Image (spheres, grey):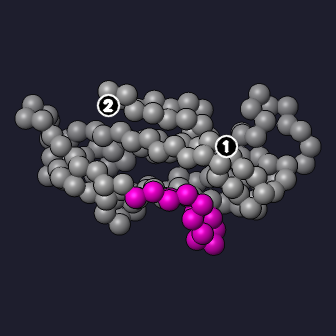
Amino acid sequence: MKVLIAAVADHAWVENGCLSLCRAFDSVNVDKFPYVLQRMSVALRLLVNRLEAGEHKLNISLTDADGRKLMNSDIKVNFQFSQEAVSDTSFSFALNGQNITFQKPGDYVVNVLVDSRVEAGIPLYVRQVKGNSKLDIPDRI
């Protein structure tokens, strides 16, 4: 199994097997804490070998530096291959979270585990900044 895409975004969705994501980011700039991130998506595209067909456990979690989970999801997936499929086939996933509360600034990570094995770690940096940013999207860089 190989991770082709692993990203944090404002929104992600899968339609007809195709993964779409809108505004990927790895940093959030906040003026005060606690801070509530109204929406956050984790976008994944995995390349699975025919030998890995069948049921697997997918775990996606957002963790702070102390190991506390702010978001956690366990999903059972069943990778199925058609007769016409080549030896490797990609599968897409989108996990959408809402109202995630960050109590303090720091380095966070979105961990992606398949069958308890870490397949990806997506960094998310939450920083405290003073004053207003002049960016089009003020809370992200």
Question: Can you name the residue that lies furthest to the left here?
Answer: 83
Q: Which residues are magenta?
A: 61-74
Mark 2 residue element: loop
Quick check: marks 1 and 2 in contact, CB under 8 Å?
no
**Residue 30, how many percent across, how many down?**
79, 48
- Residue drawn at x 35%, y 65% is 117
**Residue 35, how many percent across, how many down?**
76, 52
- Residue drawn at x 74%, y 62% is 103
Measured along the vertical axis of the image, is residue 41 above or below residue 100? Answer: above
Question: Can you name the residue that lies furthest to the right here?
Answer: 131
49 sits to left or right of 3? left
Mark 1 residue element: strand
| Residue at numbered disc 1 | 38
Measured along the vertical axis of the image, is residue 85 above or below residue 36? Answer: above
Q: Is residue 67 magenta?
A: yes
> In the image, what residue type sits under mark 1?
Gln
Q: Quadrant of residue 63?
A: bottom right
Mark closest to the chain's N terminus, 1 or 2: 2
- Residue drawn at x 60%, y 32% is 23
**Residue 59, how many percent across, how many down?**
41, 58
**Residue 110, how many percent across, how many down?**
53, 56
- Residue drawn at x 40%, y 58% is 74
Residue 105 seen by the camera: yes
Residue 27 seen by the camera: no
Q: Is residue 36 magenta?
A: no
> In the image, what residue type sits under mark 2?
Gly
Distance of mark 1 from mark 2, alpha carbons?
Answer: 26 Å
Measured along the vertical axis of the image, is residue 7 above or below residue 137? Answer: below
| Residue at numbered disc 2 | 17
Magenta highlight: main SS: strand
